[in-house]
Image: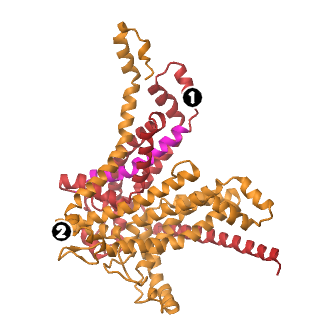
Chain colours: A orange, B red
Amino acid sequence: MRTAVGTVPPQSRPRKLVKFWRDGDQITHLVTLIFAASVFLVTVFLVYELWIHSGPSRAKFGFRFLTGKTWDPVAEDFGALPFIYGTVLTSFLGLLISIPLGVGAAIFLSELAPPQLSNACTFLVELLAAVPSVIFGLLAIFTLVPLMRQYIEPFLKGALGVLPLFQGPAYGVGYLTAGLVLAVMTFPFIISISREALLAVPREQREAALALGATKWESTWQVVVPYARLGILGSIFLALARALGETMAVTMVIGNDTGIHTSLLSPGYTIAAIIANEFTEATGDIYLSSLVELGLVLFALTMVLNGAAQLLIVATTGKGSKQP
Amino acid sequence: MGRVARRNIVNNVMLTVTALCTVVTVSVLFLILGYLVVNGWRSIDFSFFTKLPLSPGEAGGGIANAIVGSGVLILIAAAIGIPAGFLGGVYLAEFGGKTVPTLIRYTADLLNGVPSIVIGIFAWTVIVVPMHHFSAWAGGFALSLMMIPIGLRATEQFLRGVPNSLREGSLALGASKTRTIFSVVVPAARQGIMTGMILGVARVAGETAPLLFTRPRSRIRAGCAHRAVWQAGGSPPAVRFATRPG
């Protein structure tokens, strides 16, 4: 409102109008506001659409949908538990592997490596974050699955076969393979965001710890890492959200079995995988709306995690979320 | 063994472990890149890009339909996603008070984190269902939704990086705010904004999941590259069935 309404004499009203249109500030404001607001509206609309289209399923199953163990399209009896279980288990396995390795690498890249090496590695790691997930899946089928079937899974059965976690035949596909693929796919997130959080720790913190006689590792582990803990946690949350929603790569290696199995070697299913596999061939309203409700469950899961991650990242770096 | 010696050993061991972590993670990622280049190189020649795929079992053929399909989808997505992301970003950086931009920023980050398969369902409910058939529009719409938050945040970030003295100089010369934004501030941030947009395009260019429910599945009509990869990957019979030509 720079047209200074109060100072314009009444007789120059047409001129004011001309100036308004020539400046177009209000118009620009309005147009950009509409586009910015579209992001908000689309997100609300997305939730609304998922809610409406999952209506028949919600009406028929209610909360039983979340705890049901059967997925029987013929009898139209649907329960989401095997998929929720598979999604949570594969994401957990993936993060179990990628958190220690990723955070370790971030510590090395921020504290020990020479800056050129660190920047070069981070640049390439971030570049690899852009590799399409279907490529990860394809590579896993050609390389990781045969490897798992012939060497790794027989070895695990031999060494740890007494545990219920490592029993049953070695198919090559299953929870463990999916977890490994997710671990590789979440490396770039954890490494680049954790490294940034570690680099944001003030130099004085390290110097103070070293001056008190701490070794390099002690200063890093007891001073620098706790200082950057929120940023590291944020990177883990983002990786988790990514792992939960990962579709193509997981669908290709999970094995597509609608049961719930304790053994990590057995095939399973995830929410995203069953939507990808069955959505286009779903017959009947209940079947389709059950799949949409699975999408709603997945959305709710990732939304909560993402919200927590954003808050954590804002709290540490004050820069808003980073998007690798 | 003295305390100092023990601490030094712990120091060395742990620092070596972090170095090992780096070697493991970075080398896995590099193996992936290397595998793709080495194995993909052999089947790449000119006709691979210009021919249509033949039926499975026949030698030869190409991915022309897939490349055309990807191109069309990316064009549609960019035509919607880039202007929307750019103008929204201008609002966040140049206009706006406190509450509205915070809300929009937060939802943009949420939308950026929504699983792509859920976006696919959304595009299916709002475009495929009313139109009664799959279309490039639905696929492009789904991809543009994934692009908007990236473009929005990139534009905002780089516009905020422009020093205020530039804005004040322009306003002091009598330019309107609109003029200031589009003739002074945006050109100053041009490079960063373009990088952000390219990143957005790159992200959706490799997306697969949202296209499963939205794209036509024809080998003669344009398919798309990701679907081609997906079908080639020994997908389970159910999916083969789902992705049959039609």
> Do residues under tags 2 and 1 come within 8 Å of each other at their CB atoms?
no
Name the quadrant of the N terminus of chain A: top left
Determine the secondary structure under disc 1: helix
User: Residue B64 versus residue A45: which sits nearer the camera?
Assistant: A45
Categorize mark 1 by other alpha carbons within 10 Å: few (<14), some (14-19), many (20+).
some
Amino acid type, callout 2: Thr
Q: What x and y, as percent, mark residue A33?
A: 38, 36
Amino acid type, callout 1: Leu
* Residue B152 lies in the magenta-colored region: yes
Q: Residue furthest front?
A: A63
Asked if A170 appears above or below B95 in the picture, the reply is below
Q: What x and y, as percent, mark residue A286?
A: 19, 67
Residue at x 65%, y 64% (from the top left corner): A107
User: Residue A161 versus residue A80: which sits nearer the camera?
Assistant: A80
Q: Return the mark for residue A255.
A: none
**CA gap, disc 2 to disc 1?**
60 Å
Q: Main secondary structure of the magenta part?
A: helix
Splitting the image into 4 quarters, where does residue B51 fall?
bottom left
> What span is colored magenta in the figure?
B134-160
Residue B60 visible in rendering = no
Q: What x and y, as percent, mark residue B190?
A: 51, 38
Residue at x 38%, y 60% (from the top left corner): B115
Q: What x and y, as percent, mark residue B176?
A: 46, 22
Residue corresponding to mark 1: B166
* Residue B85 lies in the magenta-colored region: no
Residue A313 visible in rendering = yes
Residue corresponding to mark 2: A283
Categorize mark 2 by other alpha carbons within 10 Å: few (<14), some (14-19), many (20+).
few
Determine the secondary structure under disc 2: loop
Chain ID, mark 1: B
Chain ID, mark 2: A
Asked if B190 appears above or below A131 in the picture, the reply is above
